[in-house]
Image: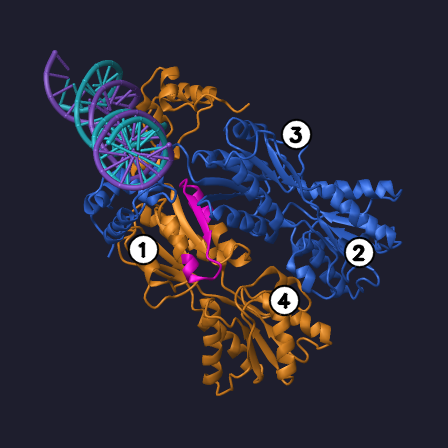
Chain colours: A orange, B blue, C purple, D cyan
Amino acid sequence: MPSLRKAPTMTDVARVAGVSPMTVSRAFKPGARVNDQTRARILEAAEHLGYVFDSTASNLRSQKTDFVAVTIPSLNNANFADTVGALNEGLQARGLQILLGYTNYDIHEEERLVAQLLRHKPQAVIVTGGRHTPRTRHLLLSAAVPVIETWDLPETPLGHVVGFSNADAVQAMVDHFVRKGLTRIAFIGGDADRDTRGLDRRRGFVAAMQRHRLEATRLIAAGPPPISMREGAEAMHRLLDSAPDTEAVICVSDLSAFGALSACQRRGIDVPGQISIAGFGNYEVGAICVPSITTIDPLPRQIGAFAAELLCDLLDEKADDMPVRRHILPQLLIRESSI
Amino acid sequence: MPSLRKAPTMTDVARVAGVSPMTVSRAFKPGARVNDQTRARILEAAEHLGYVFDSTASNLRSQKTDFVAVTIPSLNNANFADTVGALNEGLQARGLQILLGYTNYDIHEEERLVAQLLRHKPQAVIVTGGRHTPRTRHLLLSAAVPVIETWDLPETPLGHVVGFSNADAVQAMVDHFVRKGLTRIAFIGGDADRDTRGLDRRRGFVAAMQRHRLEATRLIAAGPPPISMREGAEAMHRLLDSAPDTEAVICVSDLSAFGALSACQRRGIDVPGQISIAGFGNYEVGAICVPSITTIDPLPRQIGAFAAELLCDLLDEKADDMPVRRHILPQLLIRESSI
DNA sequence: CTTGTTTATGTTATCGTTATCACAAAACGT
DNA sequence: ACGTTTTGTGATAACGATAACATAAACAAG
């Protein structure tokens, strides 16, 4: 029975409750001082009328929305989903509503998205990654709201940062393999310049190999992001064809690592007996599969939780204007797939 | 350089462009009639001032927001992410912004979420599933906006439906196994009454077994949703302990099926030689792993695309008031994990 | 009993956009 | 050339909540 009459407003509630609209407004704010009985009468009247608070009007009048804009590369990615989940939990209590957009790993799509999201006058913007178009940077800097970049450590941040060095994390992985005595190490990652975090990981791989005076020539390009299981499997087949003597493979993510593992299983290649495999991201599949996959846990929920905490401080003006740079320390998880 | 002055409004743009605010407003609406030169001058002025359109004010004045509220059980689920992704693509062109919330498989959390989302006066509400608290039903019915239930075929729909029968889909899977001559078939699913789609699948399993005059006693409860890989593996161990002569297992999702497969591999049980395994959802892991997992593809992107299409028709008032009930036909994908 | 403080409520004006009505000028049809 | 339609623009008021200020009553302190 959708009511055909116009939806009731605070004025309607006020009339029924026998108070002024202002008192109704206060009755709906948790912190406001209203007589308990009056508030009860108002809420009863509101319930009776089927009144629904109108955030739009509230947001306009108070010049202060309850939105936080968030962009992630892909919805369909457990890591980013975890970050957004933790973020959401941290913002729930303050009644903040996330406006989520996904960029499809494309900084131009990010630009479009940021422009669209800013029209809703969010209280803050949280973006994934530290590489943006000049226009995106301009839009965010002139928006006069806090900006948090995550999942990265940008050289020239837009504002605050909650992230880690993707390059360093992969270097730790290379070190792990080298300590085990492996030298013919390959890297499977994306080929386009779209996935900046993936490229950072590749850069870290190359840097670490050079540091160990090893050849960083076994670089397999698995196509544009997202690099998923299928691309990982295909890349592994190509690697095994072109460089069968490879001793270890580091993949840009656990998903591609799992694909690589499956490719080995199809070929009857023993992991880790003949080849060691490592991934990135600590996806569940890598913990469950046989053999389980050595990986790096970038603590995505911690990223979200820290961002939420920082945001709450900023909105409370507890934090001063100094840009915060909060480091996450990814954890290396040695599992069965590497000797 | 966050501007410290107040953000420019249409009035400011109007002054610079030498027109009235109304003309500026029209210049920002794609369909409005404005002289091309005038519009160009206005857009230039807006760009120069760093003007950002204020949806909040627009939404309030026109009594018509650009929001569509969407609830899904979990962000971290490739199926729902696919549905939301396709939905988003379908709504992008109309400039609609999705307000996403996740219920954590809890209809009481859904109630809280729906109440919160309705405060933003969305143009429509899209929910996952057909089971809701009485209050959720009341809120949605009195909201006077289109409601679409997805991923299910509710007996008493709130409005429109884009979904399929989870029970029927699993029955088809049982039929497949029975045709292959398997009779000692188990089901691994959730135990709580929270995941309604999971329970529907279990109901379909029991119904199909009874139809084939087989005992539906091998029911393993894997805990509260989301039932993931780990729960699937644990459930499989319990099943193998309690009923080692089981010939086939149907899992509530591909994730739990993969967990079950891994458990078999750890125990040295051959799949499908000794046990056949099937899942639900056509997650990528099931297509890549060895052996690949027989599954049912519920076509999540199609659900999202249909919902978007329906929504656009409804907002254009192309569709009449009759509730639409659009059936999805899940596809049975036979793979290596079943004989 | 006066004065100051707290508590509970009301009044007025306004946030930034746009629905609506109004109107002049240009384009069109005959 | 004259009525009719189309095109382009402006003036005014309003969407629904609340910031800011005002006020009355109750209460405490001296």
- The image quadrant of residue B217 is top right
* Residue type beneath disc 1: Leu
The span from disc 1 to disc 3 (Cα, nearest Å) is 47 Å
Q: Chain of mark 1?
A: A
Badge 4 and badge 1 in a common chain: yes
Q: Whole-percent x and y of residue A293?
A: 62, 68
Badge 4 and badge 3 in a common chain: no
Residue B65 is tagged as none
Give the extent of the magenta segment.
A88-110
* Residue type beneath disc 2: Leu
Q: Nearer the viewer, residue A181 or A80?
A: A80
Q: Residues within 10 Å of mark 2 (few under 14, many from 20)?
A: some
* Residue type beneath disc 3: Thr
Is B22 above or below relative to B271? above
Q: Whole-percent x and y of residue B96?
A: 45, 43
Where does label 3 land, which residue? B156
The span from disc 2 to disc 3 (Cα, nearest Å) is 40 Å
Badge 1 and badge 3 in a common chain: no
Q: Chain of mark 4?
A: A
Disc 2 or disc 3, which is closer to the eye? 3
Where does label 1 land, which residue? A139
The span from disc 4 to disc 1 (Cα, nearest Å) is 37 Å
Residue A230 is tagged as 4
Label whose residue precedes the other's in the sequence (2 or 3): 3
Disc 2 or disc 1, which is closer to the eye? 1
Is B37 above or below relative to A107? above
Where does label 2 land, which residue? B240
Is B21 above or below relative to A240? above
The span from disc 4 to disc 2 (Cα, nearest Å) is 31 Å
Q: Is residue B109 visible?
A: no
Q: Are marks 4 and 3 in contact (CB under 8 Å)?
A: no
Q: Is residue A93 visible?
A: yes
